[in-house]
Image (spheres, rainbow, N blue to C red):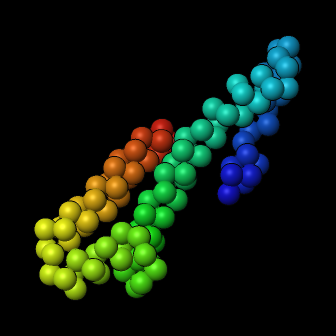
Amino acid sequence: MYADFLEDTDPMTTEAVASSGATRFQAVCHGMVPQISATVASYTLYRWECTIRSATILGFVGTGGIGYSLVISIQRLQYPKLVTAIAAVFAFVVTSDALASRPRAKMV
């Protein structure tokens, strides 16, 4: 996906920076990176959010992690521990979504 983001950049911007006397590295840093930074940050945070949710679901069916902690808490009737684990997952998802909303707002 990151390579696709690089391919979608406008090459005229990088060429304009290079034609002003910048080195190749400077042309990439000042011509290409600003075009993809919001998209890369948004996609990375989106994948992080998906990973948290997937880890919870996979753990719930028996592979370990926080989902496994949920199952054990339910089986042992440890409701305070269960509420804490659910709150942790919720906090991770809400925080990552809030962080991802900033780059997404810049893209629009």
Residue 43 is left or right of residue 6, and the answer is left
Which corner quadrant of the image does residue 80 belong to? bottom left
- Image coords of residue 3 (percent x, y): 74, 52
Quadrant where the N terminus is found in the figure: bottom right
Task: Name the residue located 40 percent from the left edge and 85 percent from the top edge.
Answer: 61
* Position of 10 relative to 83 (above/below): above
- In the current view of this chain or complex, which residue is farthest to the top? 21
Number of numbered discs overlaid on the protein picture: 0
To which quarter of the image does residue 66 belong?
bottom left
Q: Is residue 91 toward the left or the right of residue 5 in the image?
A: left
Residue 9 versus residue 49 in the image, above or below: above
Q: Nearer the viewer, residue 101 or 9?
A: 101
Vertical position of residue 54 compared to residue 98: above or below: below
The reply to whether residue 60 is in sight is yes
Q: Residue at x 26, y 65 (%)?
A: 85
Task: Report whether 33 appears left or right of 70.
Answer: right
- Residue found 23% across the figure and 77% down from its top: 73
Residue 30 lies, with reference to residue 63, above or below; the image says: above
Coordinates of residue 55 in the picture (x, y in percent): 44, 70
Coordinates of residue 45 in the picture (x, y in percent): 49, 51
Q: Residue 35 appears in which quarter of the rendering?
A: top right
Residue sitting at x 63%, y 32%: 34
Q: Is residue 16 visible?
A: no
Residue 100 x/y as whole percent: 43, 47
* Viewer-proximal residue among 69 and 61: 69
Please state which of residues 27 and 44 is positioned toward the viewer in this rendering: 44
